[in-house]
Image: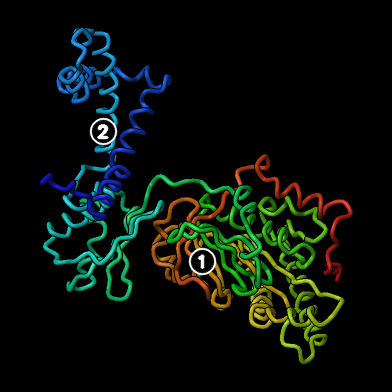
């Protein structure tokens, strides 16, 4: 009897598909990329490339197979055709070499294809073995931002944490690209991807759907959550008062502008803004907006008056609220709505530390607003470079509930915001420490320039030259 044809098992089918996806496909993509006309100039640019091409004439499997299996004998003697096949084979060889170089080697198992997708796991294993640290890999999470390897080990915590710099060196990583933390019973090795995509605000604001806004009183785009790769829309009323910290040039200003423009876009006339910018250049683009009050001069006296007026407004609102607990419930019950008031202070340290005797009064008023202003619809947002005790009053910082921290100058700065690892963040990254997110890492959205920022142009049409009026007025002539 003829033997029955053996069918491939599901496991074999999955492995074949995995092998194609993880090896054949990326090699083919690299091969065809090298065939592009603009890349041909560098095809034989060095001796290694030329030797590889010559070698391909003799060892190229595709060319040899063609010569030995072609039934048309005369084609075997056609050197032009042979050269063409060898050249195509060369590109695939070059693609294979590039793939292996980019992935630090290749390892294909019998049951499962595991090309160095977890190359860092292998590197880390070699390093821990060389340091004679017993371990077991519990799980590995790979995203476009980083590779997180969870390790179980019985060694003392300090034995691993104190070796962070040495481990980074042994793994051929920059020190800023490796962070070791402790999560429950695991050591988490977070290996950063040095090349990251830029996420533009004008692209992602179009992707916000009604489901993301539903149930949020003051929605705004927070950023891209690195653990999931999803855009997160947060609620300012939940986050409450915010501290935004980070060294210059790391994305802090972009974050503030994304926050402001998101709030204006999604909430229309429900918010009035007060912007204090002693430098006069960060928030100056909003000075002509009818829903904004802009302070661009270094006048602590005017800031003190403004805070006094704001406290008066807060007390008047509580009288209107009566037994109603918060502004949200009040607006739902009344036709005449009261707008939320968002106070934004750029370079908070210039306002709270400078000003001589007025500094104490300003700090006291800020603390009062932070403590009891939320129910009346008054929210404070402060941005600064160094959130240490010398730059900001401790009580003010403690009452800024939500912390969004970009890369800071050194590790000591992270102690004031409870955001470990913030000193190693890449440009545009930040750590969110809020009621919703416990030291969660995000990628901020980027506003490149006014050419891309069509959102700002739309807001100008709405709020400039007789647009939406501000529902709150401050008299500074006291």
From this view, report whether residue 278 is shown above or below residue 2.
below
Q: Which mark is residue 50?
A: none
Furthest residue toward bottom: 323
The residues bearing labels 2 and 1 have C-alpha atoms spaced at a distance of 49 Å
Q: Position of residue 68 (x, y in %)?
A: 15, 19
**What residue is shown with label 1?**
387
Question: Residue at left 45%, top 62%?
Answer: 441
From this view, report whether residue 312 is shown above or below residue 93.
below
Q: Secondary structure at mark 2?
A: helix
- In the image, taking residue 75 as reference, residue 455 lies left or right, namely right
Question: Residue at left 84%, top 80%?
Answer: 334
- In the image, taking residue 460 as reference, residue 262 lies left or right, namely left
Q: Position of residue 39 (x, y in %)?
A: 39, 22
Question: Within 10 angstroms of label 1, few (less than 14), some, or many (20 or more) residues?
Answer: many
Q: Position of residue 276 (x, y in %)?
A: 70, 62
Single out the mark in the foreground, 2 or 1.
2
Q: Quadrant of residue 269?
A: bottom right
Q: Position of residue 227 (x, y in %)?
A: 43, 61
**What residue is shown with label 2?**
96
Furthest residue toward right: 466
Instruction: Report the quarter where the C terminus lies.
Output: bottom right
Dots 2, 1 in contact, CB < 8 A: no
| Residue 321 visible, this angle | yes
Q: Quadrant of residue 72?
A: top left
């Amino acid at each position: 009897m003829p033997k029955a044809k053996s069918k491939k098992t599901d496991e074999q089918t999955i492995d074949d598909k995995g092998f194609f996806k993880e090896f054949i496909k990326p090699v083919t993509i690299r091969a065809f990329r090298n065939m592009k006309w603009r890349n041909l100039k560098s095809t034989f640019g060095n001796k290694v490339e030329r030797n590889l091409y010559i070698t391909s004439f003799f060892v190229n499997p595709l060319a040899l197979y063609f010569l030995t299996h072609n039934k048309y004998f005369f084609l075997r003697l056609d050197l032009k055709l042979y050269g063409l096949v060898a050249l195509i084979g060369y590109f695939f060889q070059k693609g294979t070499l590039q793939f292996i170089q980019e992935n630090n080697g290749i390892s294909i198992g019998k049951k499962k294809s595991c090309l160095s997708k977890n190359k860092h796991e292998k590197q880390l294993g070699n390093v821990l073995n060389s340091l004679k640290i017993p371990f077991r890999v519990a799980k590995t999470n790979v995203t476009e931002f980083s590779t997180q390897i969870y390790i179980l080990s019985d060694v003392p915590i300090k034995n691993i944490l104190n070796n962070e710099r040495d481990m980074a060196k042994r793994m051929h990583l920059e020190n800023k690209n490796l962070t070791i933390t402790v999560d429950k019973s695991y050591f988490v090795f977070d290996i950063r991807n040095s090349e990251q995509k830029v996420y533009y605000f004008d692209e992602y604001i179009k992707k916000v759907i009604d489901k993301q806004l539903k149930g949020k009183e003051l929605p705004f785009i927070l950023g891209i959550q690195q653990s999931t790769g999803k855009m997160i829309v947060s609620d300012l009323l939940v986050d409450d008062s915010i501290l935004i910290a980070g060294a210059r040039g790391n994305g802090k200003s972009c974050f503030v502008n994304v926050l402001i423009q998101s709030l204006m876009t999604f909430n229309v006339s429900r918010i009035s803004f007060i912007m204090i910018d002693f430098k006069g250049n960060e928030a100056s683009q909003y000075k002509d907006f009818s829903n904004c009050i802009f302070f661009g001069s270094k006048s602590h006296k005017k800031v003190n008056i403004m805070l006094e007026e704001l406290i008066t407004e807060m007390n008047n609102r509580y009288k209107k609220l009566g037994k109603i607990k918060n502004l949200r419930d009040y607006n739902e019950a009344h036709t005449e709505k009261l707008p939320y008031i968002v106070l934004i202070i750029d370079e908070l340290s210039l306002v709270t530390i400078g000003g001589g005797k007025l500094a104490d009064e300003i700090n006291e008023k800020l603390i009062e607003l932070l403590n009891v202003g939320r129910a009346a619809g008054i929210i404070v947002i402060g941005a600064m470079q160094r959130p240490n005790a010398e730059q900001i009053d401790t009580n003010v910082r403690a009452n800024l509930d939500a912390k969004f921290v970009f890369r800071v100058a050194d590790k000591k700065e992270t102690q004031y915001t409870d955001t470990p690892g913030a000193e190693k963040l890449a440009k545009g990254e930040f750590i969110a420490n809020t009621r919703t997110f416990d030291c969660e890492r995000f990628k901020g959205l980027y506003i490149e320039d006014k050419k891309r920022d069509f959102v700002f142009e739309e807001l100008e049409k709405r709020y400039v030259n007789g647009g939406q009026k501000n529902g709150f007025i401050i008299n500074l002539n006291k």
